[in-house]
Amino acid sequence: FKKSKKNIVFVIADDNLLYNECIWNPILEKLCSNSNIDFLPIAASKYAYANQYLKKLNMVSAKRALDSEDFKFDLRILDFCIRTIKNEKRLKLFISHTKKDEDGYGEKTAKLFRDTIYSSTKFEAFFDANTIPNGSDFGKVIEKNARNSLLLILNSDNYSSRDWCQREIYYARKNDCPYVVVDLINNTVSRLFPYIGNAPCIRYNNNIDYIIWTLLKTALNCYYEKEFLNYIVKIDRKSTRLNSSHSPQS
């Protein structure tokens, strides 16, 4: 564990663990006391909360883990991994959309995403109509939240032509924020905003859980790769300095 910057351990709290606490409790105690370890208990037994080291923690239920059609379990796992890497208490999903579609499809779908996020997940949702306090600087609030969130781009017919939608993408790209594009196009888009490219694109078909799962998977890959590349650069620089200090003086 000391060789890694951070470690994630998933503890499967099944009947075997609970019936053999003399073996497992010393391990759980070490996990709890190690600051370099973040561990997530997964309740695979109805008696999981009886364990003295696990009962104080909010466990993930294993009931849905084997259901390939249900993404709730996967979302909990991805959420935990991302928060561990980012040292964040709660993830925020920025729902980037336009209200200017002739059929109102973008705004209507954005509200569905917002309601699903608040009712079925543990994430925050940034939805400008409800989130920006009265009297606040609209632009500053948008920029602050766009650069500190995972971005859901609801790409409807008039999305790419809207100035604020373009700014939201720009702020997110500028700050290396992960994002996915949700295809809501019904008719014709005169021209796509070029910054919208180079990201997963998903056709919307009432598949909100899958879209959020794709966003979190994209975010985890993005954050982990960034940390890993920074680590490689750091090691390479350290190695270069050591080699330079031992080279013959001219």
Image (spheres, helix red, strand yellow):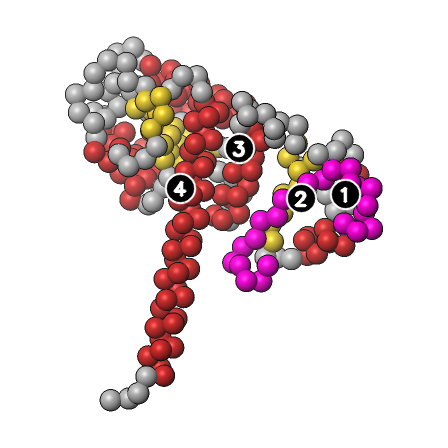
The residue that disc 3 covers is 75
Image spot of residue 86 (x, y percent): 47, 48
Which portion, as a residue range, is magenta?
1-25
Report the Cα–Cα distance between label 1 and label 4.
39 Å
Report the Cα–Cα distance between label 2 and label 4.
30 Å
**Among numbered discs 2 and 4, the one appearing first in the sequence:** 2
2 or 4: mark nearer the eye:
2
Mark 1: give few (<14), some (14-19) or many (20+) Cα within 10 Å.
some
Report the Cα–Cα distance between label 3 and label 1.
25 Å
Magenta stretch: residue 2 in it? Answer: yes
Q: Label 4 sits on what residue type? A: Asn
| Label 2 close to label 4 by CB (< 8 Å) | no
Which residue is depicted at the point 66% across and 32% down?
A: 61
When the figure is inspected, residue 214 is found, relative to residue 221, above or below; the finding is above
Q: Label 3 sits on what residue type? A: Leu
**Among numbered discs 3 and 1, the one appearing first in the sequence:** 1
4 or 3: mark nearer the eye:
3
Report the Cα–Cα distance between label 1 and label 2.
9 Å
The residue that disc 4 covers is 148
The residue that disc 2 covers is 11
Report the Cα–Cα distance between label 3 and label 2.
17 Å
The disc at residue 17 is 1
3 or 1: mark nearer the eye:
1
| Label 4 close to label 3 by CB (< 8 Å) | no
| Label 3 close to label 2 by CB (< 8 Å) | no
